[in-house]
Image (cartoon, rainbow, N blue to C red):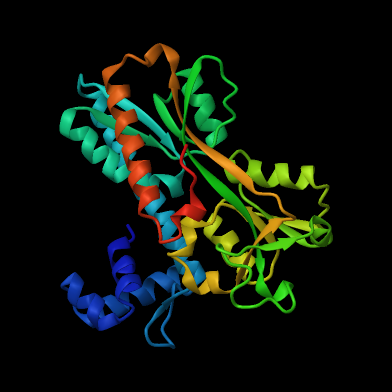
Amino acid sequence: MYRLDYVLMLAQEKNMTKAAEKLYISQPTLTKYINRLEEELGVRLFDRSVQPIQVTRAGITFIEEMKKIQNRELMLKAKLLEMSREKGTIRVGVAPVRGEYILPSAIRRFLKKYPDVSIYVDADLEERSEHAVAKGDIDIAVGIFSTAYEELYYEALEEYEIFLLCSRTRIPGLGPEEGTLEHPYFIDPEKLNGMRVLLPASGGGQYQAADHALKKHDIVPVGEICCGNLHTLYELAAADCGFLFCTPQDFIMRYPKETKSIAFCRLRDETMLQKVYMTWRREDTDDPMIREMAEDLRLSVHLETRGRTPNDEVFARRR
């Protein structure tokens, strides 16, 4: 089994000696493990030719995927444990990026009132999560939904602006104060014809926004790059590999290097907005656990939106 804690600590400390000290192991032991792991995988997870040590793109992917595997293992163990007990359960659907911000605090508050309840988290695409709630496979979900199911209750939680992201090198003469979130650059949709479009996985809210914008403005890209990892798409936009429609607030503070290379644009004078909803079955409205989880998720979204960055008024327009 991979020692993800070794990889995470080195990624955090960016120094072999410091990481080994934090792990309470010797520096040669950590170095030997990383060497063996990279040899087994056939890729370099870390660039150790520079100081501080940097995580490679392969390293970022390895960490993200290993976290998903660990989460699935935890969910499987929890599910098997639940099968041996006669306890209540609640199933929550939320996309991975959004869940990273709102779930920990929401679940912590929920467990104070329901300490013996098992919680299953489904981190699937929003289209599937919405359908799963309608089928009864998920109890409550947060995401960018179609609001098309009559049997579901929808509550609008927040509203984000969708920006068009591209490399700053694509816009000649762009000043340092232009093409920012505070002062977006207004671009003619026709200028995007012949460029490559960067698309998230089909079925998610970000994909829906991109597809809508392309069709509405008759944009004909030369090709596309499809990827389920939004951070990778963000990097590709910064590297001038295409243009991307997205709500970028989850990346700006986490990836400042890429952000400096990105121009934040609007199409002509249009402001594109995207709503985030919470949904559950109407028949479950009086369920006390559903009500409690809804309140905890609502509070987490409110706190997370309020504390994002100094520019949160640009990111979110609360309803």
Residue 169 visible here: yes
Q: Residue furthest top?
A: 283
- In the rendered view, tell whether residue 55 sits above or below residue 5: below
Observer-nearest residue: 194 or 42?
194
The image shows residue 111 at horizontal and vertical percentages of: 20, 34
Judge left or right: residue 71 versus residue 176.
left
Q: Quadrant of residue 37?
A: bottom left
- For the residue pair 218 and 204, the one nearer the viewer reads as 218
Question: Is the residue 27 above or below the residue 198 in the image?
Answer: below
Q: Residue at x 29, y 34 (%)?
A: 296
Residue 285 percent location from the top left of the image:
37, 16
Residue at screen point 68% across, 47% down: 210
Q: Does 118 appear above or below 12?
A: above
Residue drawn at (70%, 49%) of the image: 270
Horizontal side of residue 45 vs 162, given as left or right: left
The quarter of the image holding the N terminus is bottom left
In the depicted structure, whether residue 87 falls above or below residue 30: above
* Side of 29 relative to 46 (left or right): left
Rendered location of residue 242, percent (x, y):
70, 63
In screen coordinates, is 38 left or right of 108? right
Give the total of numbered labels. 0
Q: Position of residue 229 (x, y in %)?
A: 54, 54
Q: Is residue 79 visible?
A: no
Residue at the spot x=19%, y=79% of the render? 26
